[in-house]
Amino acid sequence: MPLELQTGPRGVHRIDAIRGGRFVVAGEHCTGSILIWPGGVQAAADALTFEAFAPLLALDPAREVLIVGTGAVLRWPDQSLLDALAAKGAGVDVMTSQLAARTYNVLAGEGRLVGALLLGLGA
């Protein structure tokens, strides 16, 4: 599924599309789950744990918004995870990974300090 092509700040990592259940970032197909922020993208664990967010939480400056993409289906994470993420000072939004990809692109395009953990969608 192509996402609307929008131009944003130069050098900002954006999710170009979702094809075959994979995220496409800068023309590269990412298999499985990813962590993405305007300055980078990396493979992520396929679990919603506090440790999975560590690379995003270590960024300086801190993220003002953390997006949690729960895969193809909305699954609410444990409240303890949401509380721990919120304690770091970021707003936390939970949604399916497809919707999270679009939301991430909008916020990154606005120059916001955003980060997302997007669980994979499967093939």
Image (cartoon, helix red, strand yellow):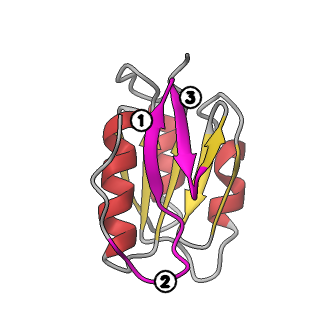
Q: Is residue 98 above or below residue 5?
A: above
Which residue is at the front of the view, 106 or 88? 106
Which residue is at the front of the view, 9 or 34? 9
As helix, strand or loop, the secondary structure at mark 2 comes to: loop
Q: Is residue 43 above or below residue 12?
A: above
Position of the C terminus, as image quadrant, is: top right
Q: Earlier in the sequence, mark 2 or mark 1?
A: 2
As helix, strand or loop, the secondary structure at mark 3 comes to: loop
- Residue lying at 42% horizontally and 35% vertically, measured from the top left: 97
The answer to whether residue 64 is left or right of residue 47 is: left
Looking at the rendered structure, the kind of residue marked 2 is Arg
Disc 3 and disc 1 in contact, CB within 8 angstroms? yes
Query: In front: mark 2 or mark 1?
Result: 2
- Identify residue for label 3: 120
- Identify residue for label 1: 97
Which residue is at the front of the view, 38 or 83? 38
User: Image quarter for residue 107?
Assistant: bottom left
- Identify residue for label 2: 10
Looking at the rendered structure, the kind of residue marked 3 is Gly
- Position of residue 83 measured from the top left corner of the image (x, y, whole percent): 46, 47
- Residue lying at 39% horizontally and 47% vertically, measured from the top left: 101
Position of the N terminus, as image quadrant, is: top left
Crowd band around label 1 with a 10 angstrom C-alpha radius: few (<14), some (14–19), many (20+): many
